[in-house]
Each structure stands twice: as C-alpha cells, then as structure tokens.
Image (cartoon, rainbow, N blue to C red):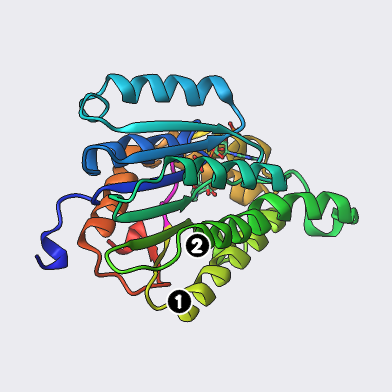
Amino acid sequence: MSSTERRDLGRALCIITGASRGFGRTIAREMSRLVKPRSVLVLVARSADDLRSLQAELAESEAGRAGLVVECVVADLGQTEGLENVVRTSKESFSEDIDHILLVNNAASLGDVSRYAKSFTDMAEVNSYLSLNVSSSLCLTARVLQAFPQRPGLRRTVINISSLCALQPFCSWVLYCTGKAAREMMFRVLAQEEPDLRVLNYSPGPLDTDMQMVARSKTADPNIRKSFSDMFAQGQLLTCEESCAKLMKLLLDDNYTSGAHIDICDL
Ligand SMILES: NC(=O)c1ccc[n+]([C@@H]2O[C@H](COP(=O)([O-])OP(=O)(O)OC[C@H]3O[C@@H](n4cnc5c(N)ncnc54)[C@H](OP(=O)(O)O)[C@@H]3O)[C@@H](O)[C@H]2O)c1
C-alpha cells in the first residue's frame, strides 16, 4: 500500500499530552476514530475529572465498542514523577500487536503574558515555565523512544504542537515564544538524529480555546491584544476540529519531511 492510500493510523498506542481540554481533547477524539480496533489511547493532563469524562465518552463511541483501550494519567508534566507515570502506563498498555507508537506533545502553557521581557528577573519563575514547556517534552519523548525502541514492523511518530511563536517574536510573550522556539529546534535535531522516526512540528493556527481567551484578555502589548480580540470578534478563530482534521490528514498521508514545521496556513 502506498503511504498516500493509508486510511488509518494502524494498531496504535497514542500518547496525548494536554488531553483534558482544547486541542488535545480534540486530537484524542479524532485519533480514536482513525486507529484500528484494540488500539490504546493514553490521555495525560492534571484535571482528572476532564480526563475521566473523555474516557467515558470514548468508551461509549464506536471505537470504544470495537475495543479501543483508553487510559488516563493524571500528572503534572512539569514534574519528573509525571513523566514516569506516563511511561509506566504506556508500557503496561503495550501489546506485541501494536504497530504504531504516536506521541503528541500538545500540553503547554502561555506563561504570564501580562508583562514584558525586562520584568522576568526571577530565575525560578522562568525555570518553572521551561520545565513544563521545554524540558518535559524532550524528556518525555526520550523516555518514550527508549521504552519503545526501533524494531522491524513498528512505526514511531512524534508530533510537537508548535506555533507561529516558534518562528516570530510577539511582544509580551517572551516565555511562550522562547519555549516554542526551543521545542521546535529540539524536534528538528531529533529528526536529524533518528532517520527512522517520523517527526512533525504542526502549527495549528489561532484556535478557539482557553489559551486564546487568556491571550486576548491578559496580553500586555496593546497591538497584540487587539489583534487577538479582533480575530475573536470577527469569527476568525479556528475550531479545534478544523485544525485537527488537517493534522490527521498529514499523519495519514505521511509524506511530510521529518522535522518540518507545517503551519495550517500552508495547507
Ligand atoms: N490556542 C491557540 O490559538 C494555539 C495556537 C497555536 C498553538 N497552540 C498550541 O496548541 C496546544 C494546545 O493549546 P490549547 O489552546 O488547547 O491550550 P489549553 O486550552 O490551555 O489546553 C492546554 C492543555 O495542556 C494541559 N496542561 C497544561 N499544563 C500542564 C501540566 N503542568 N501538566 C500536564 N498537562 C498540562 C492542560 O490540562 P490541565 O490543565 O488539565 O493539566 C490542557 O489539557 C499548545 O501546545 C499550544 O501552545 C495553541
């Protein structure tokens, strides 16, 4: 079968961080429809109730009735213990007939956008931001790659949910832009080092989520705040479903260059 004919993601183990709400929750729903029966979804976030409600919803769905296994890991990814719990659950859920491991590094935070770069004097504050937004995605990815090493018949795909902010400076968004730029470079290096891996940096566009609401209400820079408010007022934000559909098509077609930055606007 040529790669462009793929209509499913295989018998997959999908680890999705930040699955409790927003884009990650939509990714979990869409992936559940595209994996073969007896695949596994590992949903990660701090909000237990939101993860459990998604788990229940997926259990009731057609995929759930066809044998999809959904595991919740309630974890703070800014802490090493959180990463350990994700890897432990993923290993326990793995079975030999799984032929595709997908890790979606989606969880992120905006950081304090109500201040400008010159106010960030506190190393502990910056380190804490980078711990979740940069260190955890590198260390979780490395742990997953070690837990599921390359072997014949096993595809491995790592997705980084990126942003225009990985490429472009936004005033008063120093933490977010720094984190997204660092994260993107990390995955580009990984793609160079590991040619058997499929690595995708996907920039989902402006999405109507909690993060956007904080962006348009808290951003210190008046021009940036206004541009987000205008996008919201004029109905220009994308739904998570619209953006996720493009991401799923990229994964199914599977002909992107590994390590590439693909923005929804380019599709
Ligand atoms: N929204 C946009 O316009 C936009 C644009 C470009 C890129 N993105 C990117 O898209 C991704 C999803 O964004 P979103 O808009 O869906 O954000 P969101 O609504 O704020 O959701 C963020 C998710 O990350 C999880 N999370 C945050 N801190 C965590 C922690 N310490 N440990 C574990 N999980 C944590 C949250 O769950 P808990 O709070 O339950 O832990 C939540 O599920 C992010 O990478 C974001 O940077 C968003």
Residue 65's quadrant in the figure? top left
Q: Residue at x 45, y 74 (%)?
A: 191
73 or 47, which is in the foreground?
A: 73
Q: Which residue is mark 2?
A: 145
Identify the magenta region.
203-207
Quick check: 228 left or right of 58?
right
Is disc 1 in contact with disc 2, using a CB cutoff of under 8 Å? yes
Instruction: Give the crowd class for mark 1: few <14, some 14-19, many >=20 residues within 10 Å.
Output: few
- Which numbered circle lies on residue 194? 1
Q: Is residue 28 above or below residue 155?
A: above
Q: Residue at x 11, y 68 (%)?
A: 2
- The image quadrant that residue 258 belongs to is bottom left
Quarter occupied by the N terminus: bottom left
Q: Could you say whether the residue bearing mark 2 is in a helix, strand or loop?
A: helix
Q: Under 8 Å from ligand 1: the CB of mark 1?
A: no
Q: Position of residue 170 (x, y in %)?
A: 62, 59
The three-letter code of the residue at mark 1 reads Glu
Q: Is residue 206 magenta?
A: yes
Tag 2: residue type? Leu
**As rendered, which of 85 and 134 lies closer to the eye?**
85
In this view, the residue in front, 119 or 230, is 119
Q: Position of residue 257 (x, y in %)?
A: 33, 74
Q: Is residue 44 magenta?
A: no
Q: Is residue 239 visible to the viewer in this orientation of the structure?
A: no
Image position of 183 (left or right of 220): left
Determine the secondary structure under disc 1: loop
Q: Nearer the viewer, residue 151 or 81?
A: 151
Badge nearest the viewer, 1 or 2: 2
